[in-house]
Image: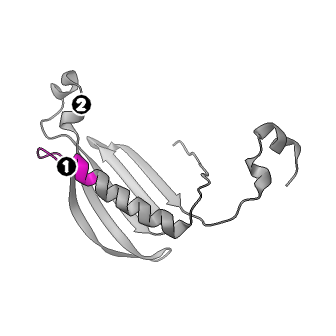
Amino acid sequence: MLLKEYRICMPLTVEEYRIGQLYMISKHSHEQSDRGEGVEVVQNEPYEDPTHGPGQFTEKRVYLNSKLPSWARAVVPKIFYVTEKAWNYYPYTITVTAWLVDAFQADISICYLGIRIPSVLFQPLANVEEQEF
C-alpha cells in the first residue's frame, strides 16, 4: 500500500471550499454526461458513521469507453466504467474507486482543516530546514 499526505494552503475558509467543491463536482459531472456516457449516480442516501457522525453515501459509475484509445476499446467490454463509492462526513471524506475488478482500487481519505499556518512555513525550503519549530 502506498500512503501519501498532501497539505495544500488555500486562500479561503473550509466552508467556502465545500461550496465550491460541490459546485465543481456537479458541473463536471454534467459536462461529462453526454451520448450515454459520463456519470451515473447509482445510490445517494444519508449514512450514519459511529466515528464521524451523520453524512452522505454516494455510489457512482463513471463510463469511460469513449475516452479510451482505439486499441483499448477493442479489448475492453463495450460498457467500461469505474465505480466510485464515497462517504462524505464533511470535513472528512472517504472515497473508494475500483475498476474492472475490485483488485484494482484506490482508497482516498481526506480531512479538510481550517487552521492558520505560521508564515515561516511559506519560506523557501532551505530556510525552513534551518529553523526549529
Where is residue 35 shown, x and y percent of the image? 11, 44
Front of the two marks 2 and 1:
1
Pick the front one: 127 or 71? 127
Q: Quadrant of the C terminus?
A: bottom right
Image height of 17 relative to 61, above or below: below
Label 1: few (<14), some or many (≥20) within 10 Å? some
- In percent of width and height, residue 54 lies at 41, 78
What residue is pinned by disc 2?
Answer: 68
Image point (61%, 52%), residue name: 7
According to the picture, the residue beneath numbered tag 1 turns out to be: 33
The extreme top residue here reads 71
Asked if the stretch drawn in magenta spans residue 31, the answer is yes
Question: Residue 104: horizontal and vertical position, in percent?
Answer: 35, 41
* Residue name at image x 14 percent, y 41 percent: 79
Helix, strand or loop under label 1: loop
Q: Is residue 28 visible?
A: yes
Q: How many marks?
A: 2
What residue is drawn where x is 72% and y is 59%?
117
When the figure is inspected, residue 127 is found, relative to residue 118, above or below; the finding is: above
